[in-house]
Image (tube, rainbow, N blue to C red):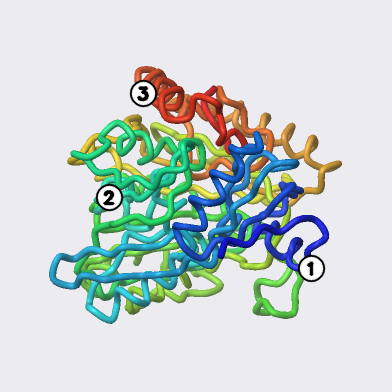
Amino acid sequence: MTRYLNTTDPDYDDQRLGYNLAVEHKPEIIVPAEHAAHVVDAVRHATDRGLGVAVLATGHGPSRPADGQLLINTSRMDGITIDPVGRWARVEAGVRGGALTQAAAVHGLAPLAGSSPEVGVVSFHLGGGLGVLGRSLGWAVDHVRAIEVVTADGVLRRSTATSEPDLFWALRGGGRGTLGVVVAIEIDLHPITRLYGGGMHFPADLADRVLSTWAEWTATVPEEMASSVLLIRMPDLPALPEELRGRYVAHLRFAFTGSVADGQRLVAPFRALGPITDTVTEMPYPQLGTIHAEPTAPVAFHARNRVLHTFDVAAARALLQHAGPAAEAPYLVELRHTGGALGRAGAVPSALGRRDGEFVLYAGGAASTSEAPRLRAAYKRLFEEMAPWGTGGVCVNFLSGPDVSAAELASGYRPEDVLRLEAIKRAVDPDNVFRTHHGLA
């Protein structure tokens, strides 16, 4: 039986909050779905009453508040089916990346996973999916085989390249919560069991040298080498190692699918700089999440990003003016090296057609509602400074917070794909039932 929770229900608050507290949903009704049938019932219940429908799984990428609407919480839909011979998995809407990675590893296989094992597999793929190993495997969206989705008419559909092809095209990269409620996806798995990876922390006085070295080094590495740099002032918390506590650091992260010997040779220039910490070693693939070691405690977080066509020594110096040790920036900054397979078209076209750029520059910070304007102003200054190296686009997966505009979202797509997405939205959701999540119109 489908449960409908209202504001007086004792489970109401637990079901409306996710990881990112920047958006506080206050829906009229919450449905804690456990099966696809519950989602079908919920959508029909909402449309019968003229309510909009919003979706919450892990809550990492919230958009607009679902106030006065019906919110479907899919976190209890945690089924995973693995086909080890066909190398694919069927994953329900509430499954997190870490759970899928562990399940696939039993069969010597791996999904293309993101940096955090806490992020939902479905939302990760629907937003494009910038995986840690994307330089060699491409975008996660290119490894989706089928999508099971409940559309605004309350019908459960199976969408593939040959069945509901327009919907399949749009959902993959362009339909995160705006075209229906995805209850499950089928995705490719890969015969990867281990990698050479980890991180190195460097002190503030080496930040310039590390970033400049990395900028030149990225032009020389094979696609099998993924890397990123985090610039952050670490919190002064007892849980952190004493050598990092409260200090500004540059955290350089690596994930390499080649041999240990080749990995050691590739990271040697950074070991020569004298890191504070060095955890780079051979590891089982399920330990991928330890490389970035992203926090898991809920927080009100606002994030922006820009795609860069290049990142050279001049760009490194410009970035440090805003995010270096002396800048006291109210945000952290991360640079991810993309390019490689991420710049190539997938075998089956998707809405994620814009694939230019070699780096993603991401900025994120915790801020209350009253502090958010100051944070937005700081982001504006940062990205204006970095504009000479930018493509003008964004990485859709990394947009988060209630103030993302339609124009900002649209910059992550080719203009012709925006028009097609808008047409498909009008066709499958003419009454804009799914109006809470960020859309292009």
Mark 1 / mark 2, whichever is N-terminal: 1
Residue 38: image location, x then y, percent = 51, 58
Mark closest to the chain's N terminus, 2 or 3? 2
In the displayed structure, 440 sits above or below 133; it is above
Element type at mark 1? loop
Instruction: Give the CA distance from mark 3 to mark 1.
Output: 44 Å
Quarter assignment of residue 369: top right
Q: Residue at the location (62% across, 57% down)? A: 31
Q: Amino acid at mark 2?
A: Ala
Q: Nearer the viewer, mark 2 or mark 3?
A: 2
Q: Secondary structure at mark 2?
A: strand
At label 3, the amino acid type is: Asp
* 434 to the left or right of 253: right
Q: Identify residue for label 2.
A: 146
Which mark, by number, is residue 10?
1
Give the image quarter of residue 441: top right
Determine whether, in the image, residue 180 is placed left or right of residue 382.
left
Do callouts 3 and 1 mark residues in contact (Cβ within 8 Å)?
no
- Cα–Cα span, label 1 and label 2: 37 Å
Looking at the rendered structure, which numbered label has been put on residue 417?
Answer: 3
